[in-house]
Image (cartoon, helix red, strand yellow):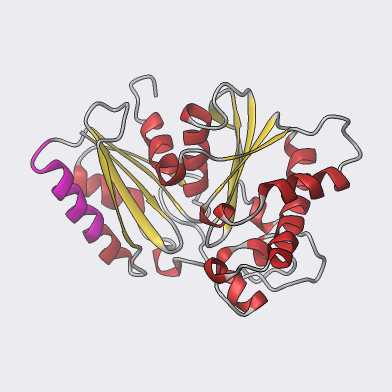
Amino acid sequence: MYLVFEIGGSNMRIGFSKDGKSLAGSKIVVAPQDFEEGMTLVQKIASEFCGNEKILGVAGGIAGPLNKEKSQLANSTHLPQWVGKPFKKRLEELFQSRVILDNDCVMAALGESSFGAGKNSKIMAYVAVGTGVGGARIIDGKLDNNYLGFEPGHQIIVPSGNLCKCGGKGHLEAYIGGSYFEKLYGQKGENITDEKIWDEVAFHFALGIYNTIVHWSPEIVVLGGSVMKSIPIERVRFHLGELMYVYKEIPKIEKAILGDDAGLLGALSLLSPQN
């Protein structure tokens, strides 16, 4: 049995696999703010899935950058009580098995690269818009080398602009992240029906994607996350076309297709025998 998980800014999704190749089931719960409460919940759900069967591997992602050893959360605007806690060590103690940790968007990117919209691409950029904004660069199905992790949501698109929860100003996340809509537009994203608002969001997203393209030079940009269900991708493509002059050919801009399973499948891909 294999255990996989995705811990976002709002929810925690936990799944399991019997063969290490496909998901056999999953469950979604609210992500606890308290670290130990979160560990207890992971253990409880794992027991529901696996019973007394041996768990051969554990892998998953969490919202925010990890330390260089990929053993604990280094910073988080959404789960501050998890920062600096012995995440990997606690999972190793609980399950007595191999544990692989990374950013939640990295896991989703690996899922889309291996099984989804970016399958068979050589260079894929993944950007996810949910509570916040994250992403990763995948080359030949593998996470690109990096030092501190990828954080495309914290690129500056408006100098001295909107205040981001990290403390910076003008970051992409502060214009399109789901947790900012109520402050920006007076209502939660799921309640917004005004096409002008979504077009404004699409424009700001296009600014971020433009920067991502000229820095990462991908052949495809895959857009995921819960808020992407509402952002009109055709308007993102339109605004990107208006911005792009340096390249004659714009990379493909596609929606992620794996939905809630992307991060779990990405984590599972890291537990395969060849890894």
Q: Residue at x 44, y 40 (%)?
A: 262
Looking at the image, which is closer to me, 101 or 217?
A: 217
Confirm whether the magenta stretch covers residue 43: yes
Name of the residue lying farthest toward the right? 245
Number of labels in the image equals: 0
Visible in this render: residue 112?
A: yes
- Image coordinates of residue 7 in percent, x first then y, are 40, 55
267 versus 33 height, above or below: above
Looking at the image, which is closer to me, 144 or 251?
A: 251
> What range is drawn magenta here?
41-53
Looking at the image, which is closer to me, 222 or 273?
A: 222
Q: Is residue 6 left or right of residue 151?
A: left
- Image coordinates of residue 172 in percent, x first then y, are 70, 60
| Quadrant of the snapshot with the N terminus | top left
Confirm whether the magenta stretch covers residue 216: no
- Image coordinates of residue 66 in percent, x first then y, are 49, 51
- Image coordinates of residue 78 in percent, x first then y, are 48, 66
Visible in this render: residue 147?
A: no
Name of the residue lying farthest toward the left? 52
Q: Is residue 145 left or right of residue 199?
A: left
160 versus 109 height, above or below: below
| Quadrant of the snapshot with the C terminus | top left
Q: Residue at x 87, y 47 (%)?
A: 242
Give the main secondary structure of the magenta stretch: helix
12 versus 222 height, above or below: below
Q: Residue at x 57, y 30 (%)?
A: 118
